[in-house]
Amino acid sequence: MQQEQPGENVRAALNLGHEHGVLVSTEGVGDSARGEPKVLVTMGSDSDLPLMMKAVDILRYEFGIPCLVQINSVHRDLRAAVQHIENLPASIQVVIACAGGAAHLPGNIADLRADLPVIGVPRDLGALKGIDALLSMVQMPEGAPVAVMAIGDAGAVNAGIHAAKEVAIGDPAIRERLQAYAEKRKGKVRRQNETLEEKIKG
């Protein structure tokens, strides 16, 4: 009898085909992952993945939050994007969406899923270096809010932290991890002060 892979029952329970996204958790990726995804991390192309891995990694390693990673292009395959977003697992509480240029993806998701907070990450891309994406996301019309982060790396990291704060509203364990993360950052400043005199002396 063929042995069942560790993540197969999770994937089956979530009704996820590989074309619908990849489950990522502290334990692993895809069939090695554990838990129900709380956050969707989506982008228009896999060229955005190195940037968005900063959000994925902070979610899984700092806060222990499983996430679903998807490619959704509203410019190349709008019908598939709509289908994916309308049929997300019920466990998803927050969406992080990265886009460059015209950057329609976060706003489209905000329209499709009025029940979910959407966080936009503008990609540093093209002639305007992400300014066009930033303005496209931040100038959403009244009634379709998108919480927009900084352009590039800082935005991806902050999107992961902001998503964790959303999840923490109903999860005391995540609140504790957020506090621990903040303390770790304070510790870095303290350590820099301890070695400051030596650095000034050269």
Image: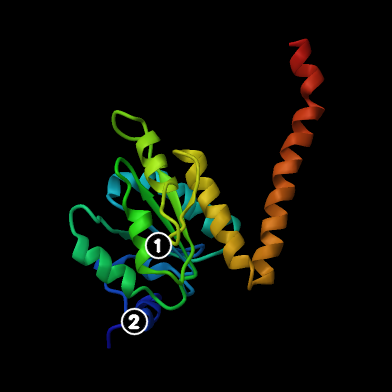
Residue at 71% in and 63% down: 176
**What numbered label is drawn on residue 28?**
none
- Whether pointer 1 and pointer 2 mark residues with C-beta atoms closer than 8 Å, the reply is no
Q: Secondary structure at mark 1?
A: helix
Q: Crowding at label 1, few (<14), some or many (≥20) Cα neighbours within 10 Å?
A: many
Amino acid type assigned to the residue bearing label 2 in the image: Ala
78 to 193, vertically: above or below: below
In the picture of the structure, the residue carrying the numbered disc 1 is: 110
User: Which residue, as the protein is rendered here, is positioned at the far bottom?
Assistant: 1
Residue 47 coordinates in the image, percent (x, y)? 29, 44
Quarter of the picture holding the N terminus: bottom left
Residue at 72% in and 56% down: 179
- The image quadrant that residue 81 belongs to is bottom left
Residue at 19% in and 66% down: 79
Q: Secondary structure at mark 2?
A: helix
Q: Nearer the viewer, residue 151 or 52?
A: 151
Residue 161 coordinates in the image, percent (x, y)? 57, 53
Residue 52 coordinates in the image, percent (x, y)? 41, 49
Q: Nearer the viewer, residue 56 or 101?
A: 101
Q: Nearer the viewer, residue 44 or 102?
A: 102
Q: Is residue 43 left or right of residue 36?
A: left
In the picture of the structure, the residue carrying the numbered disc 2 is: 12
Residue 69 coordinates in the image, percent (x, y)? 37, 60
Single out the mark in the foreground, 1 or 2.
1
Residue at 68% in and 64% down: 175
Q: Crowding at label 2, few (<14), some or many (≥20) Cα neighbours within 10 Å?
A: few
Q: Is residue 111 left or right of residue 37?
A: left
Amino acid type assigned to the residue bearing label 1 in the image: Ala
* Precedes in sequence: disc 1 or disc 2: 2
Disc tally is 2
